[in-house]
């Protein structure tokens, strides 16, 4: 069961990243962001919200090691931490921020707790 849930988490990571990578305008809208006079926002979506997550998910599947899955959890923990700090300091739309942060937190907890003691 652990292996299946790990693979699902990695595949979700790739799927989330594909939105930013292939559909940056959709992702901007989902995150309540807009581009400015520059298209640099689209570049940032494809890079940090897209490619970073796609390649990380693929690498975790390729490595297929408990420590790799645990490190993916650390990535999600960092995202959740940033999201919850933002809730405290930036006043984003609470439901949306809490939903995204909750997903990130659940993935972080699962990936870290299920894999850290299995690492060789």
Image: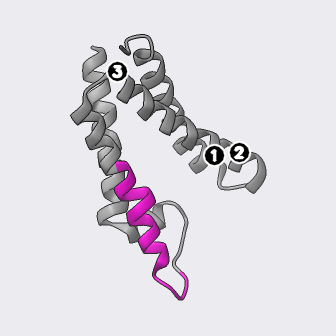
Quarter of the image for residue 61 reads top left
Q: CA distance from mark 2 to mark 1?
A: 5 Å
Looking at the rendered image, the disc whose residue lies closer to the viewer, 1 or 3, is: 3
Q: Residue furthest left?
A: 62
Q: CA distance from mark 2 to mark 3?
A: 28 Å
Q: Residues within 10 Å of mark 3 (few under 14, many from 20)?
A: many
Please tell me the numbered disc located at residue 82.
1
Q: According to the image, what is the colour scheme of the structure?
A: one colour
Name above or below for residue 42 compared with residue 32: below
Marks 2,1: beta carbons within 8 A: yes
SS under mark 2: helix
SS under mark 1: helix
Which residue is the site of mark 3? Answer: 66
Q: Residue 17 placed where, x, y %?
A: 35, 52
Q: Residue 106 placed where, x, y %?
A: 49, 29
Q: Residue 88 placed where, x, y %?
A: 76, 46
Camera-nearest residue between 100 and 107: 107
Q: Residues within 10 Å of mark 2 (few under 14, many from 20)?
A: few
Magenta-drawn stretch contains 65: no
SS under mark 3: helix
- At a point 26% along the width and 19% down the height, the residue shown is 3
Q: Residue furthest front?
A: 120
Q: Residue 120 placed where, x, y %?
A: 35, 13
Magenta range is: 36-53
Total number of numbered discs in the rendering: 3
Dot 1 or dot 3, earlier in sequence: 3
Which residue is the site of mark 2? Answer: 85
């Amino acid at each position: 069961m652990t292996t299946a849930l790990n693979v699902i988490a990695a595949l979700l990571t790739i799927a989330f990243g594909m939105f930013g990578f292939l559909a940056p305008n959709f992702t901007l809208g989902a995150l309540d962001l807009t581009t400015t006079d520059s298209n640099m926002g689209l570049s940032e979506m494809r890079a940090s919200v897209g490619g970073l997550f796609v390649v990380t998910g693929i690498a975790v599947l390729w490595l297929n090691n408990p420590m790799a899955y645990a490190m993916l959890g650390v990535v999600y923990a960092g995202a959740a931490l940033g999201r919850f700090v933002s809730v405290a300091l930036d006043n984003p739309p609470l439901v949306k921020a809490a939903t995204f942060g909750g997903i990130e937190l659940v993935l972080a907890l699962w990936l870290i707790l299920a894999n850290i003691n299995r690492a060789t």
